[in-house]
Image (cartoon, rainbow, N blue to C red):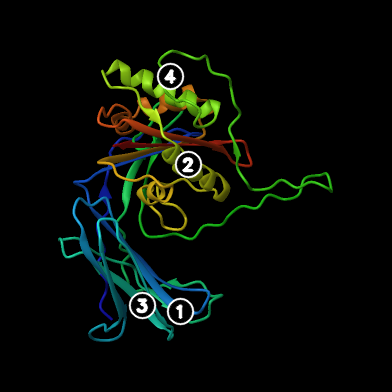
Amino acid sequence: MRRPLGVLAGLVSVAALSAPMATAHAESVSLAACRLTVNEPTLSTAGRIQASAVREDCARPGLVRVRILRAVPGDDPVVKSGAARGRFSRVTISMACAPGTYYATATDYRGNSGKSKAVKLTCDPAATPSPSPTSSSTATATATPTATPSPSGTQTSSPKPTATASPTTTRTVTPTPTAKPTRTVTPTPTRTATTKPTPTSSSTSGTVGSTEENEVVRLTNAERAKGGCQPLKHDPQLHKAAYDHSADMAAQNYFSHTSKDGRSFMDRIRGAGFTGGTGWAENIAMGQPSPASVVEAWMNSSGHKANIMNCKYNLIGVGAAKNSKGQIYWTQDFAAR
């Protein structure tokens, strides 16, 4: 078989400071940016091979074509192909399973292309696909900085730069029953404790979100005012996208702009019902105990600060959720509309 070529990861923002407890990432897009991400073939519960590609953050519509190829000696044949057109296209194709090694490619005919890593599939839905020993991993990844309780990064701030590359399999930690026989601790994240903030005349949060989430909005607007930016309005759809992502990260014990199901922050924003817009961004953080500490962490990271201080954004959604250990996951979603 021919060795699939790796796709270089694209660095969205560069700013990271290490910290032992709290972390954060930041990610932003404008209509000028365009990414094509290809997911490796997997076996569905119905026993079919499926692969997908996502075209996101693109200014102009494009035709996305996804192909599944089987790795064999000589030329690798295309065994399945499908296409769709749009600015934010998601194309998923599937086929009957035959044991073998497969990989997926995609192109949008506007100069963007991608290739997944190769995996060996056995046609047993209970089996986990294993990477082909001869394949190179390829992922359009966003290496993003992370935020710390002191300094932190963009799109969500903090210490360790992380990259969202090829999909990874992680375990969801299920808490064990408590000492009381009639009650168990569930993995469902809880909203953060509502520390009563001092109301100020500059608050534009309204009734959207919790007290702590609205305090993050207030503190963010206070920082923006120092740079001459107008205050952000707390938008219900952006709040839903932000809170759902924080809750998902807390429940499934991960920290990334890419959800476990492969959705980007733009997928989550659109999925929450937000329409229109000319630019978007996301900051995430984990471990900061209060609104003041997380905003400080983001402001101490150049990438995250750039999202907060971008005067073109006029809407925000803030979500905060605790995991079973009481650690808070924070998400800010920004939009210009």
Mark 2 surroundings within 10 Å by alpha-carbon count, few (fewer than 14), some (14 through 19), many (20 or more): many
Mark 4 surroundings within 10 Å by alpha-carbon count, few (fewer than 14), some (14 through 19), many (20 or more): some
Q: Nearer the viewer, residue 204 or 38?
A: 204
CB atoms of marks 2 and 4 within 8 Å: no
Q: Which mark is first along the chain, 1 or 4?
A: 1
| Residue 250 percent location from the top left of the image | 55, 44
Q: Name the residue carrying label 1.
A: 48
CB atoms of marks 2 and 3 within 8 Å: no
Q: Name the residue carrying label 3.
A: 102
Please identify the quarter of the rendering in which residue 132 is found.
Answer: bottom left
Q: Is residue 96 above or below residue 130?
A: below
Q: Which mark is first along the chain, 3 or 4?
A: 3
**Amino acid found under the numbered disc labelled 4:** Ser
For the point 81% across and 44% down, which residue is it? 179
User: Marks 4 and 1, Cα distance to the nearest angstrom?
Assistant: 52 Å
What label does residue 203 carry, if any? 4
Q: Nearer the viewer, residue 293 or 233?
A: 233
**Amino acid found under the numbered disc labelled 3:** Tyr
Q: Name the residue carrying label 2.
A: 240
CB atoms of marks 1 and 2 within 8 Å: no
| Residue 51 percent location from the top left of the image | 37, 71
* Discs 2/3, front: 2
Q: In this figure, what is the number of numbered marks?
A: 4
Q: Is residue 226 above or below residue 125?
A: above
